[in-house]
Amino acid sequence: MNDFKKFLKSGQKRLFLIFGIFNFLITNIFLQISLLIMPTFLATVLSQIINFLIGYYLYGKKVFKIKNLNNYVFRKFLLLAIFLWLLNFGFIQTFFYYGYNKNLTAILFIPILVCISFSIQKYYVFK
């Protein structure tokens, strides 16, 4: 928990967290509405695409202050998104294999993913 408190000390990190929460809320509102009117697979894929695009813009422009979000930066952000998804999936599956609840594991892994995501965005994607 101390690592998470350290994480929140910088203004840039606070912005990252605020915009992350905003992105999460918008994406999940879209998902909930979409689940009422379309198949689950399509609703979840579309919500992930929206999450990705909103995150790319907000983190790039508002958190890391990148003036030119170009194709190269976009591809790096896409690679990060895939990496984080695989990491999250692997973590949940591994802990489930050892008898832990998937939902609880997913929730507990969020702060770790946030810290990893911030670091990679700051030092690789939007540097």
Image (cartoon, rainbow, N blue to C red):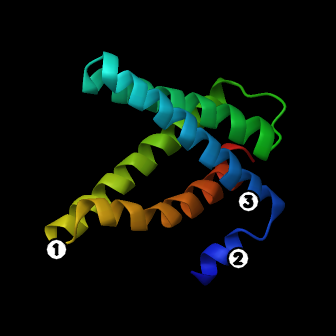
Horizontally, residue 109 falls left or right of residue 36, namely right
Judging depth in this view, the residue of 2 and 18 nearest the camera is 18
Q: Are marks 1 and 2 in contact (CB under 8 Å)?
A: no
Residue at image mark 3:
13
Q: Which class describes the residues within 10 Å of circle 1: few (<14), some (14-19), or many (20+)?
A: few
Q: Residue at x 68, y 45 (%)?
A: 19
Task: Classify mark 2: helix, strand or loop.
Answer: helix
The disc placed on residue 6 is 2
For residue 6, above or below residue 66: below
- Residue 67 pos. (x, y %): 84, 31
The disc placed on residue 109 is none
Q: Which residue is drawn at 82% across and 60% down?
A: 11
Q: Residue at x 32, y 16 (%)?
A: 37
The disc placed on residue 98 is 1
Q: Given the image, on which type of amino acid does mark 3 rest?
A: Lys
Q: Which class describes the residues within 10 Å of circle 2: few (<14), some (14-19), or many (20+)?
A: few
Horizontally, residue 109 falls left or right of residue 23, namely left
Judging depth in this view, the residue of 66 and 46 nearest the camera is 46
Q: Which of the two labelled residues, at mark 3 and mark 1, occupies the earlier sequence position? A: 3
For residue 57, above or below residue 17: above
Q: Which residue lies furthest to the bottom in this view?
A: 2
Q: Which of the two labelled residues, at mark 1 and mark 2, occupies the earlier sequence position? A: 2
